[in-house]
Structure formats: C-alpha cells, structure tokens
Image: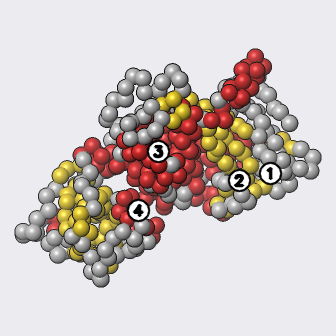
Amino acid sequence: MLILLEQVQPLKWFTSVKIALPGEAFVAYAFFCVTVESISSMADAFASEFDGRFDRLYIHFDVRDHFLKLDTFIKTAENARKVIDALDETFFDGGLEYELIVLPPEEGTFLSKLALWISGGTTVVFGFLNTDVGSAYVEGLTGRNPAEWAQSFGEDHRARIDAFQVETEMPENYETGSGVIAGPPEASPISTDEACKEAAQIVVAMARGVLEKSPDELQKVGMEVGALPDAVDARADFYAACLEDRDVKRVGFTPEDEFPIPRNSFPERARKPTRKPKDEDPPEWFVSMESIYVTSPNWDKEDQKTRQWKGKDQVRRDCYFVIEDAEFWHKVKQKALHVEVLDNLKVQWAFQNIDGRPKNRRVLRVLEFNGDKLTDPLPPAAVRAIVGQYSEYEASNGPRTLFDQ
C-alpha cells in the first residue's frame, strides 16, 4: 500500500485518522515533501545512494487490533525529528545535512521505521566524538563510548575517529569529488556513503537514548545544555501523543517484540520539566582538583543518584558525590583499575555553594586512582560545556573556610 500526499510540508498531514488493512497490518509508506513530479527522482536517489547513507530509528507500538491512528504516527515521528534537530543544533552547530524519511513496516507489524539519511556534515560528528564533552554525552545516551563505537566500525575507522579534532580545520578537499573521504593519515580512506552511514548510526542511537531513557537517567546525562531542553520537550510531546491514543499499550525502539516502556509510565514521561526563568540565575558552580579518601564506593554507575559515593575530602570533611567521568566507568567495566579496600581518588569536580555548604558534587574527571594516573584535567572550555560558567576553587589542607563546614 503506497500513500502519496502531494504538496504538503513535512509531517503536516491529516489528523485523527486511522489507517487499517483488513486482518493483517498497519502500513504507511511515505516520503516527506513528496510530490508527483519528484517520485521519479526520489526512486533514482533510493537506487543510487540512499541505501549507503542511512540508519533506521525504530518506533515500535504495541497496539490492539491491526491499526494505528495516523495522528499518533505523525506526532511521534515529528517529535522524533525535533529531538534530532536539537542534537544537531547543540552538538554539531547545525552542520549535519540530513533528511528524515518514513520507511514501510514489514507486513503484519506496527513498527514505525524512520530513516535518518545523511548527505553531508559527517566530520562534525566524528569531531564531536573526539571531545571530552562528546565522549560523555555519547556514552550517556547510547551506552557505548567512542572507543566501542570505533571498534564496531573497524580498526581503520577507530584511527579515523581518534584523529579527528573539532578545533582542527579540515583541508578543503577533505570530501573529494570521487566520493571518497581521505581522512587523517592514520586511517584508510572510506567512501562518503560509509562515513554518512556511520554518522547516522551514532545520531540515531543518541536520539533513541533521548526517547527511551527514564527521566532519572536523562537527568544524569545532563539535558540543560544548548537546545537539549527542546529535545526533552519533544520527548514529552512524543509520550503525550502515545498517552492520548488509548490503543497504544506499550512502546519500544527495536524491531523485536520488546516493549520496555509500558503505558503506566507515559504520564511521567509526558510531563515537561519546569524551565527556570531566564532572569533567575542558578547557584554558581565552583571547580577544583582535590584528593578524596573513599569510605563507601558505589560501583553501580546507574545507581549513583540513589546512593552516592561517600568519602572524606582534603580537610577530612564527609562528602557525597557522583562520578560522571565516562572514561573512568569504561575502565571500571574493563576491570582496569587496581581496587583496594579503601580507595584514594584525585578528582576534578564541580560543586555549588548552597546555604554556605558545598552541594551537588559532580566528579567530572577522575585524575588518579590509588596513586595511578588515569588522565589529565578537562580544559576550561570542556568544563564550561558541562556546567556552564564557573569559578576556580583551590582546595586546601589549611584551616577550614566557608566551604569546609
């Protein structure tokens, strides 16, 4: 079944309509901005280059009978697009060149398949992966750090990702007319299609993370930077559309019959967080490097909000904190740390002074673990990208100050 809607804007179709096929499946097959005149050229694009430059974002609805409201389909797809737009604006400076296309579900399913088709701007994606901020967000949203992404792409691509730097100006002929991306000398050339496909896989995984993760998990990732609040609002509208459709019982984001998000969780996910007025300044962040004596660790990364790490800082004051350093958790996962009964950390952390006390301690980087150096501190630009404007605070072993209560 092929549905062609002429001369319409993306996703602005009809509302409150159900599409059904007798006894078998809901099938919607459409292209954004398709007109009769463009059908031939779109078919040519599919044949010549589409297959090599995209990845699928699945939205799987567990519904009764064999239909889905078109209004539900439109709203969920539109808000998925808004999530991708917000990721592009925040992390890639709007440099990603892409189209979002609706693909047909297989017969007998209610699986909405959106294809993210990338035609350019791949260098900003790989450059983003190579930054400290990028590493943290990619790990937080996809569950895989850049090294794991590179491994899934192959060793040549690992070298490519490792060598990209956001600050480095790429040569003008970086994307060659032959359709081959030369890349840095450490990596073998790959085709433009391959680069676009890899970039699409990363962006799709990040968008899926925004839609799929629980509110608490998103809060740990940090969704206050750039246009990410718009992504959170779009996610809320996504689940509001699912809530309005009483036929939607559960939602998943894989082609398998796995629906991890039940209907009773839709209301919480459809609730938009309160945005602070622009003239209301949050408490100032302070950043320092300090040694911590750990008295009660928590090796469950996802459980840190429920039970934070506990230790004593340089002035022997009790302190509670969470560790956000993605590379540290990667080392934990790989069992690459020398763990003792009582561990000592040297960290770069951020905290806020609230009512005369340091609160909301966030370990941005674990610099040393039991005397073994792990990494260097984040540069100021990376810290600002995570916490916003901040002031340096120099920890001391001397007399206690305002922050040592």
Residue 403, x across and y down, in percent: 17, 64
- Say which label, 3 or 4, has the lower sequence index: 3
Question: Which image quadrant is residue 350 in?
Answer: bottom left
Q: Which mark is residue 109?
A: 1
Tell me how far mark 3 sits from mark 4, CA to CA.
22 Å
Say which quadrant the N terminus sits in: top right
Q: Is residue 194 left or right of residue 247?
A: left
Q: Nearer the viewer, mark 1 or mark 3?
A: 3
Element class at badge 1: loop
Within 10 angstroms of label 3, few (less than 14), some, or many (20 or more) residues? some
Callout 4 amino acid? His
Residue 177, x across and y down, in percent: 51, 21
Q: Which residue is mark 4?
A: 330
Residue drawn at x 19%, y 68% as measured from the top left: 291
Question: Which image quadrant is residue 249 in?
Answer: bottom right
Residue drawn at x 38%, y 41% as measured from the top left: 186
Q: Is residue 124 above or below residue 139?
A: above
Q: Which residue is mark 2?
A: 255
Viewer can see residue 373: yes
Element class at badge 2: loop
Callout 1 amino acid? Thr
Tell me how far mark 1 sits from mark 2, CA to CA.
9 Å
Q: Nearer the viewer, mark 4 or mark 2?
A: 4
Within 10 angstroms of label 4, few (less than 14), some, or many (20 or more) residues? some
Tell me how far mark 1 sits from mark 3, CA to CA.
38 Å
Pointer 1 with pointer 2, Cβ within 8 A: yes
